[in-house]
Amino acid sequence: MKNLLSIQNLSTGYHLKKGRTRLLHQNISVEVNRGKLIAVLGPNGAGKSTLLKTLLGFIPALKGEISYGEKKLSEITVKTMASMVSVVLTDRIDDTYLTAGEIIMAARYPYISLTGVFDDSDIKIIEKAVEMTGVMAFLNRKFQTLSDGEKQRVMITRALAQETPLIFMDEPTAYIDSPGRVELMHLLKTIPTQGKTILMTIHDVELALRFADELWLLGKEGLFVKGNPEELIANGSINKLFDTETVKFDRETRSFI
Amino acid sequence: MNQNQHKPSFAIPVTILLLVLLVLSMLNLWFGSVDLSWKELVGSILGHHATPQTNIIIWEYRMPQVFTAIAVGMGLSVSGLLLQTVFRNPLAGPSVLGISSGASFGVAIVVLAGSALGINVLQGAFMLNDMAVVTAAFAGALLVMAIILYVSGRIGNIVTVLIIGIMLGYAVSAVVGVLQFFSGTEELHAYVLWGLGSFSKNSLARSELVLLITLLTVAATWFFAIPLNAMLLGENYARSLGFNLKKYNTVILLLAGLLIALGTAFTGPIAFIGLAVPHLARARFNTSNHKILIPATLLTGANLALLCNLIARLPGMDVSLPINAVTSMIGAPIVIWIIVKRSKIKVS
């Protein structure tokens, strides 16, 4: 079977005025398979979110090719894309009246007609996702009144209910306290067991090393390295990317000292 | 997760709004400078037991006002709702896109330009060709709308579209200002009167037509409830749910623009209803789900317009107040209340 996502010679960055470009990374070639938790790791400003947005087609790739299954990204309509990739973004939802339940129900919009009637199978899928993330208690509450951790759970439930093989998450652990982060990562770790693949950006290195199946390291000078946590620790990639004058990554304790 | 649980909770307020609509319509038909008895009123509506004089008052004067008020109240309110969602801005309303300014511009051209250029096109202000004014207003509104749609079709960024709409409104208003400066007193008076708005400019046939077209357009908006709901999650989430926003923004702006053009051309610019009613509906129905909000908004809008029309010609008064003054007097407190309430939510 074809890979879920394959990236060939991809260059990410931005088109500036007068035909100039700001290049962030080049020659990224990588394949994404089913059932993986992949963490995109790198310092702030390395271009993690840009990579995610490029893969989603929100911003154009400067070079190279992105394919989902058999299809090239450029040939995939916005509508088809909705059944392949769901997202958890850092965008804030500021509507005062939306309930958590309504936001989760939106996951089924790609599959219902314009009359907006949900059928039993939609409801079943939503119930399953709700059970998995444990958000039942606040379905009828206004989204605005939830804590950041609860909000993030709701958005993850929504992504699950969209029933896509791939879920992209931009900094899902941001704004959440440390115990909350670990709890959230435990939840995310259960998702790949259903055959789905999560591609998430994260800047908490220790958390990524502990939970991810695969890491993509994005460095400042266009560096791109991938591998599993063991490899990347052993070959010194983590040290190379994150060590500073004062703080070093310790391979034994897998933490910064 | 049973969504049907919610249904009875909004079926009741919708029924209440419908009943209020009926009562307000009857009061609008009943009150006026000529006193009528209930018997005569009901007789005339049902088509029997009424003097010819009563029939004329009801069918030629008051019924067209009721139809126009309902149509314009619905149309402007729903357009306000659409614009607030598309622009994700609670202060968006029919005036922001410059479409109502476009209508004013059209009317100004017809009413004022002749006099400004020293040509006496019109036979005095009060013999204004009524149809010419409506046509000009509609053309002006559609012209601005065409520019907005062209821009939104080319530029993905909706904030840019909003800013261009506001700027267009200013530019068009400036031209109107220049025309006003150079025009004669009578024409100016006629233009100012038009700008104060009135629900009583239309014949029965025309008010029925306006109501029919408004109803069809409003009904069409209901089929965009789902993409509108998706837009509440923000541009990126809406896109990830499969909605091509460039396309939906353009179609929804087209519908909103049509409603504004209809509302403004046949009554003059009506302030505040379009901005305030969607907030009233959201607060009353405690939701931003467009499947509920669209019917809630259109009924609330029709009711508010009828109420304003009633207040504008309270019994005992021979003249009726300009409708724009009444809508602003009612609308401004509503907007203030919304802002205060929103800031309270943010603090707590």
Image: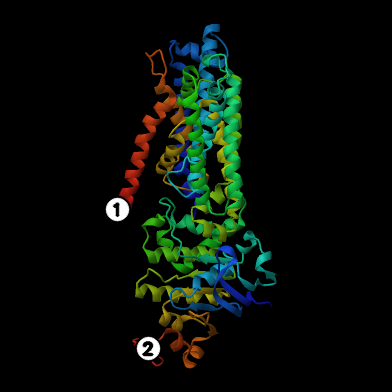
Q: Position of residue A11 (x, y in %)?
A: 59, 74
Q: Residue at x 54, y 84 (%)?
A: A225
Q: Residue at x 54, y 57 (%)?
A: B238
The quadrant in which the N terminus of chain A is found is bottom right
Work out which residue is located at the far front of the displayed protein and give it: B118
Q: Position of residue B35 (x, y in %)?
A: 43, 10
Q: Is residue B23 above or below residue A193?
A: above
Q: Which residue is mark 1?
A: B347
Which chain does the numbered disc 2 sit on?
A: A
Whether residue B56 is visible to the viewer of this picture, yes or no, is: yes
The kind of secondary structure element at disc 2 is: loop
Q: Position of residue B235 (x, y in %)?
A: 52, 56
Which chain does the numbered disc 1 sit on?
A: B
Label 1 vs label 2, nearer the camera: 2
The numbered mark at residue B73 is none
Q: Are marks 1 and 2 in contact (CB under 8 Å)?
A: no
Q: Is residue A139 above or below residue B118?
A: below
Q: Amino acid at mark 1?
A: Val
Whether residue B269 is visible to the viewer of this picture, yes or no, is: no
The quadrant in which the C terminus of chain A is found is bottom left
Q: Neighbour class for label 1 at 10 Å: few (<14), some, many (≥20)?
A: few
The kind of secondary structure element at disc 1 is: helix
Q: Position of residue A18 (x, y in %)?
A: 58, 63
Judging depth in this view, the residue of B207 and A22 nearest the camera is A22
Judging depth in this view, the residue of B196 and B172 nearest the camera is B172
Q: Which residue is mark 2?
A: A248
Q: Is residue B229 above or below residue A25?
A: above
How many numbered discs sit on the rendered protein?
2
